[in-house]
Each structure stands twice: as C-alpha cells, then as structure tokens.
C-alpha cells in the first residue's frame, strides 16, 4: 500500500481529516478496533454547544457550525439548562457567563424539566443554542466522503511499528504495511504511544475517564423534548437519549489509555448529586459505560506538524469536544497539510501548534 498520508485513528478526528484530505491526496485511515468511533467518539454526550470548552475549542466549534447545518439531520434542537442551589451561586454565575446562558425563573426551568426540585433549586439559566449532534450520521458521512474520493479505511489495524524511511514512514499492523510521506496522529488516548512508536517526543497527553449511566425515563414520562441539564461547575449532567436519560457524574479521573469502563462508586456518587436536584429517585440503571477524554498539558487541542519531525502531524487533545469541533479542526488540519492558508485566525493556528511545547 503506497498512500501519501497514513492517518492513525478512526474516531471523528481521523475520519473527518481523511475526508478533507482525500480529494487532494491518497489517504488511508487505520483503526485498531473492529469499527469506527469505538472509543471516545462512540461514547460522546453528542451535544453541539459551541460556547462550551476552552477558548480554542469554542473558536473551532463556532467554525464548525456552517458545515453541520449543511448536512441535513446532523443537528436538532435540544437546549440546555443550568441549575443550582443558592449557596452555589458563584459556580452558577461563572457557568452562566462562560457558556452564554440566559438567567430564567426557576418556574420556567421546571416547565422545561418537570422533575426539577424547586424546593432545592434557587437559580436557573437556559441556552437555546445547544443542539443534539447525530454523531453516527456525521461520522459515517465523513467516512463515505473519504471512500468516495478514493480513500481507504482499514479496521482491526492496530499499529505495531512506525519506522522512518528515505521517503517518510513505514507503518505496519497485523497483516498490513503502508509507506507514506506523512503520518497523522489522531489516535485519541493513544497519541503519545503512537508518537513513541515513531520515535517522536511525546507531548504529555493525559486521558481522563468520564462515566455515564442510562436510567429509565423518570415516572415513565416522555423525555424527548427535555433539555440537557447541568449542575453547577459541571458536577453532574443529564440528557434525554433514546427514550431514557443518561446521567453523568462528569468526573475527570486520570487514566492510562485503555478500553474504559464506568466505576460503580463514582456513578453512585454522581447519581446522588443528580437526585438532589430532582423529585424522582433513581430506582434502576439500565446500562453504564465510560469514555476517555484526552487533554494536552495546557488542555488545548494540538493541530500541526511536529517541529522536530515535520512528516509527523498531530491532531489530538480534543478533550471530549471532538464532535462539536471536528469540522473546523479537520479543515485546519487539511489546510496545514496541503500548504493552504487557513481561514482561521493566525493567533488560533499558533495556539494549536505543537511547537508551543518547545
């Protein structure tokens, strides 16, 4: 196999970048698992809230909106509530400002989220701009575009070696090998491990576990029109999903890269925090899971060529906002790889450059 570009990682970052690059170069995407989006991409809360995240994530997310709206069905209305007790006012005010919520009366919040415990909740905010993302539609759409432009996707292709050659790199996996001039490291929680395989200095990424529980619709209600609800300081959140609610303790526990699973004690603590704000107790958990949200040392995405190995390109550190920022991030990656002037501001491009780590 002799592509121009090998992309390591078949999550939303790698697949979206592959779709952008495939019209201009021969691209192959390697995914270690049986299917695309198996790890963090397949365990996303799937919300487009472009004001959520670090300043760089917000800019990339806002830059992604036009693309999402150009694909029918990718976005659908959801909305988001922020609720807090009176003694949590400081955290509430920070979230209200940081994510562009509008302050609303608690009674109005209860009308949107009928199980809200108004004896506990004293403060409420609402953001109408938050929308659901059909993550599978988006991921598979990028995959179809990639293939339609001649790109290849190889699953069950866990990379074993990455060696430098006169022309660039030789990448091997069980039963396969490719030589290419450029390697794109979009391996999620495994990005530093991929760098080590290539003899490239790791940047110090940390994967953090986030757990999730699916619970029955409270009281058998129709929850389809309910907003996503956040506790102050993101101490918990819940969101309608396929006729049920998903509830997360929103924890950040550092982990080694692995196929993550939920911690029962952490879930129990998160569900208890959620129950403090609602009138319906949790009587049963339908299922649970966890994902790894991976951050760079400064918690900002890394997009760009490695300064010491220009044939090695980082597309990493999405930190749980990979879907909402993917259209902007993938276009930036393609612009940089193809030598085109990015549409994004130069200061943002510099803020994402791996050279910032010295």
Image (spheres, rainbow, N blue to C red):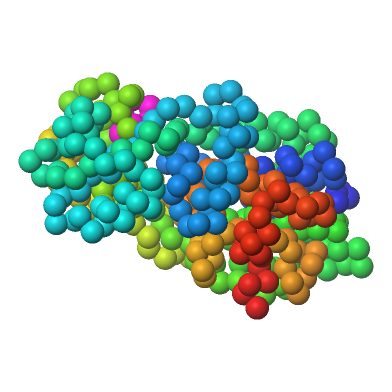
Q: In this picture, is 86 found above or below 63? A: below
Who is closer to the viewer here, 300 or 209? Answer: 300
Who is closer to the viewer here, 52 or 90? Answer: 90
- The residues colored magenta run 239-246
Kindly tell me whether residue 258 is visible in this rendering.
no
Residue found at the far left of this picture: 119
Residue found at the far right of this picture: 166
- The image shows a total of numbered marks equal to 0
Q: In this picture, is 248 found above or below 199? A: above
Q: Magenta segment, principal secondary structure?
A: strand
Residue 152 drawn at (x, y percent): 77, 40
**The C terminus, quarter of image:** bottom right
Is residue 2 left or right of 27 when viewed as pictured? right
Residue 1 drawn at (x, y percent): 86, 48
Quarter residue 196 falls in: bottom right
Residue located 91% across and 63% down the image: 167
Residue located 56% across and 50% down the image: 59
Is residue 24 left or right of 257 when viewed as pictured? right
Is residue 221 left or right of 156 when viewed as pictured? left
Quarter residue 164 falls in: bottom right
Residue located 63% across and 49% down the image: 329
Residue 120 drawn at (x, y percent): 10, 44
Residue 93 drawn at (x, y percent): 27, 54
């Amino acid at each position: 196999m002799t592509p121009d570009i090998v992309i390591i990682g078949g999550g939303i970052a790698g697949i979206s970048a592959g779709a952008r690059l495939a019209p201009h170069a021969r691209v192959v995407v390697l995914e270690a698992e049986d299917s695309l989006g198996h790890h963090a991409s397949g365990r996303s809360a799937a919300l487009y809230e472009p004001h959520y995240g670090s300043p760089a994530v917000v800019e990339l997310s806002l830059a992604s909106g036009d693309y999402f709206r150009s694909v029918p069905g990718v976005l659908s209305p959801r909305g988001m509530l922020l609720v807090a007790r009176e003694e949590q006012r400081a955290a509430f005010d920070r979230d209200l400002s940081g994510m562009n919520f509008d302050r609303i009366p608690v009674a109005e919040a209860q009308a949107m989220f009928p199980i809200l415990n108004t004896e506990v909740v004293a403060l409420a905010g609402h953001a109408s701009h938050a929308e659901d993302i059909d993550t599978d539609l988006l991921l598979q759409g990028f995959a179809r575009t990639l293939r339609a432009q001649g790109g290849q996707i190889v699953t069950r292709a866990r990379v074993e070696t990455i060696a430098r050659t006169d022309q660039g790199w030789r990448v091997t996996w069980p039963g396969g090998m490719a030589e290419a001039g450029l390697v794109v490291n979009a391996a999620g929680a495994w990005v530093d491990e991929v760098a080590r395989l290539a003899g490239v200095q790791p940047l110090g990424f940390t994967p953090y576990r986030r757990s999730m529980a699916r619970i029955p619709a409270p009281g058998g209600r129709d929850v389809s029109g309910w907003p996503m609800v956040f506790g102050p300081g993101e101490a918990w959140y819940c969101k309608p999903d396929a006729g049920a609610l998903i509830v997360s303790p929103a924890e950040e526990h550092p982990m080694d890269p692995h196929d993550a699973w939920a911690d029962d004690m952490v879930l129990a603590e998160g569900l208890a925090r959620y129950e403090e704000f609602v009138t319906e107790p949790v009587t049963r958990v339908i299922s649970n899971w966890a994902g790894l949200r991976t951050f760079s040392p400064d918690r900002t995405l890394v997009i760009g060529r490695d300064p010491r190995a220009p044939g090695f390109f980082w597309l990493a550190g999405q930190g749980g906002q990979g879907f909402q920022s993917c259209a902007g991030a993938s276009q930036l990656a393609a612009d940089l790889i193809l030598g085109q002037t990015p549409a994004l501001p130069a200061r943002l491009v510099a803020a994402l450059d791996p050279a910032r780590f010295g």
